[in-house]
Image (spheres, rainbow, N blue to C red):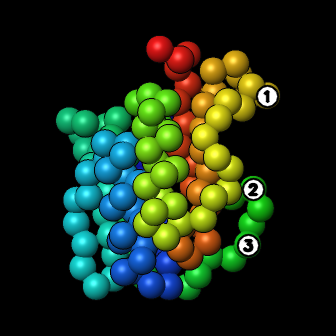
């Protein structure tokens, strides 16, 4: 459903450390950067319309919006755990440790972080435990 998302952060250096770490745990490649932006994932095109892309741009800090967040699919529960640990080690803040959220469905396994700018992000695995 999502083709691409762009978010803003006031300082790219801590954002780069954070997003490089969490995206690597999810198998999402860093695909570009300069003094004003960071790019992750692959842009969709006619041959690959299912791709998704995240752009992190230099800009104002995000305003507080309790329900706003971005959720990234994880290939397995270990990747959710790794996402959370890597995010904390790279300057993020805990916003919900890895675990089941059965109020969504019985196998919904997710973790939530705040990036160094305060953006809320999530990683989820929908598969049953192996």
Q: Residue at the location (47% across, 14% down)?
A: 130
Quadrant of the rendered structure where residue 65 is?
bottom right
- Who is closer to the viewer here, 99 or 2? 99
User: Is residue 26 in sight in this rendering?
Assistant: yes
The percent position of residue 48, horizontal first and vertical second, equals: 25, 36
Relative to 33, say whether 126 is above or below. above
- Who is closer to the viewer here, 46 or 74? 74
Question: Distance of mark 1 from mark 3, alpha carbons?
Answer: 25 Å
Q: Secondary structure at mark 2?
A: loop
Residue mark closest to the camera, 1 vs 3: 1
Q: Residue at the location (35% across, 35% down)?
A: 50
Question: Distance of mark 1 from mark 2, alpha carbons?
Answer: 16 Å
Q: Residue at the location (36% across, 71% down)?
A: 16
Question: Distance of mark 2 from mark 3, alpha carbons?
Answer: 9 Å
- Who is closer to the viewer here, 75 or 85? 85
In the picture of the structure, the residue carrying the numbered disc 3 is 64
Quadrant of the rendered structure where residue 27 is?
top left
For label 1, count other residues whose C-alpha is less than 10 Å away and answer few (under 14), some (14-19) or many (20+).
few
Relative to 81, say whether 101 is above or below. above
Q: Secondary structure at mark 1?
A: loop
For label 2, count other residues whose C-alpha is less than 10 Å away and answer few (under 14), some (14-19) or many (20+).
few
* Residue 103: numbered disc: 1
Q: Residue at the location (20% across, 35% down)?
A: 47
User: Is residue 43 in sight in this rendering?
Assistant: no
Relative to 111, say whether 129 is above or below. above
| 27 horizontally vs 115: left or right | left
In the picture of the structure, the residue carrying the numbered disc 2 is 67
Relative to 124, say whether 59 is above or below. below
């Amino acid at each position: 459903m999502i083709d691409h998302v762009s978010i803003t952060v006031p300082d790219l250096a801590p954002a780069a450390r954070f997003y490089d770490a969490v995206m690597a745990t999810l198998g999402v490649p860093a695909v570009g950067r300069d003094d004003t932006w960071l790019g992750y994932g692959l842009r969709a095109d006619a041959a690959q319309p299912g791709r998704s892309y995240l752009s992190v741009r230099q800009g104002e800090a995000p305003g507080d919006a309790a329900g706003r967040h971005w959720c990234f699919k994880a290939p397995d529960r270990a990747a959710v755990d790794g996402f959370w640990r890597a995010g904390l080690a790279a300057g993020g803040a805990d916003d919900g440790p890895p675990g089941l959220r059965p109020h969504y469905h019985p196998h919904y396994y997710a973790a939530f972080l705040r990036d160094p700018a305060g953006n809320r992000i999530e990683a989820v695995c929908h598969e049953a435990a192996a």
